[in-house]
């Protein structure tokens, strides 16, 4: 199975700061069709996960532009500029290129 | 508005089967997309379990392959999860989801496996 390694495990932040989360894959996530199916989800406390980013860098409808996904191959990053209180929670990367699809272990974005 | 809602027993005994229903409103499950089950274990670990496609084909996580079945009732716009021979390690919150990408999630249902 593809292993997604997320770092850091926890990211203490001050509101208004930038946060950055890394997701590294044990193999390339480029599909044979040329697409890279790397997604980012946020699970806020008491809520279901919500889609933020799909295919590396595409923001889902309604997601603020302070969320920026980037990367290629096996190395991906989610940046959150100007962290707001509603951004706190656990972030997961997810790959749908290879079977079985797999999640990273999560990164908790929390207040300092 | 697309909504998914899980339902089923919150407590299952070890060695028995776990059965959950996902009721979908606002979208017909035969119109498109795959319809997945995902679970979150105590702590943060998430696992994609499998899906049933809009055409009715299925794809399962090999780690569950001999225990899992995902089926559907198109007349009720529902799909189902059955997980056999459960152990305490199957205790988790179970989500039904439309995707990929997983844009729409149910609220999740906690299933505890305990005698």
Image (spheres, coloured by chain):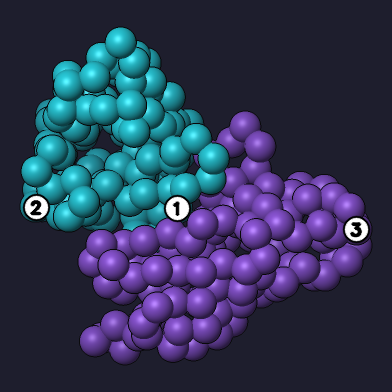
Chain colours: A purple, B cyan
Q: Residues within 10 Å of mark 3 (few under 14, many from 20)?
A: some
Where is residue B18 drawn, in percent x and y? 22, 24
Residue at mark 1 to residue at mark 2: CA–CA distance: 20 Å
Judge whether residue A61 can be spotted in this image.
no
Residue at mark 1 to residue at mark 3: CA–CA distance: 29 Å
Instruction: Name the image quarter holding the N terminus of chain B.
Output: top left
Judge whether residue B102 can be spotted in this image.
yes
In the image, residue B49 above or below residue A97: above
- The circle on residue B57 is 2
Q: Residue at x 77, y 68 (%)?
A: A19
The picture quadrant where one finds residue A34 is: bottom left
Q: Secondary structure at mark 1?
A: loop
Q: Earlier in the sequence, mark 1 or mark 2?
A: 2
Residue matched to label 1? B103
Do the residues bearing badges 1 and 3 touch, measured as CB atoms within 8 Å?
A: no
Q: Chain of mark 2?
A: B
Q: Chain of mark 1?
A: B
Q: Secondary structure at mark 2?
A: loop
* Disc 2 with disc 3 on a shared chain: no
Image depth: mark 2 or mark 3 in front: 3
* Disc 1 with disc 3 on a shared chain: no
Give B26 or A4, whichever is nearer the viewer.
A4
Give A97 or B99, whichever is nearer the viewer.
A97
Residue matched to label 3? A14
In the image, residue B68 above or below residue B82: below
Q: Residue at x 40, y 78 (%)?
A: A26
Where is residue A104 drawn, in percent x and y? 48, 61
Question: How many numbered marks does the figure carry?
Answer: 3
Residue most toward the top? B115
Q: Secondary structure at mark 3?
A: loop
């Amino acid at each position: 199975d593809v292993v997604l390694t997320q770092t850091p495990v926890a990211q203490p932040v001050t509101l208004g700061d930038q946060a950055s989360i890394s997701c590294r894959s044990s193999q390339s996530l480029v599909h044979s069709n040329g697409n890279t199916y790397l997604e980012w989800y946020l699970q806020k406390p008491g809520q279901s996960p919500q889609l933020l980013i799909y295919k590396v860098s595409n923001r889902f409808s309604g997601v603020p532009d302070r969320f920026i996904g980037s990367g290629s191959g096996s190395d991906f990053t989610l940046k959150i500029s100007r962290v707001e209180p509603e951004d706190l929670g656990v972030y997961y990367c997810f790959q749908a290129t290879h079977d079985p699809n797999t999640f990273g272990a999560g990164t908790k974005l929390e207040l300092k | 508005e697309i909504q998914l809602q899980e339902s089923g027993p919150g407590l299952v005994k070890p060695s028995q089967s776990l059965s959950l229903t996902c009721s979908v409103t606002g979208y017909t499950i035969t119109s498109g997309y795959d319809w997945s089950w995902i679970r979150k274990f105590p702590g943060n670990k998430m696992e994609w379990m499998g899906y049933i496609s809009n055409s009715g084909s299925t794809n399962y996580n090999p780690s569950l392959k001999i225990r899992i079945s995902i089926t559907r009732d198109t007349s009720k716009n529902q799909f189902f999860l059955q997980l056999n021979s459960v152990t305490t390690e199957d205790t988790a919150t179970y989500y039904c989801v439309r995707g990929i990408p997983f844009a729409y999630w149910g609220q999740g249902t906690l299933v505890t496996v305990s005698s």
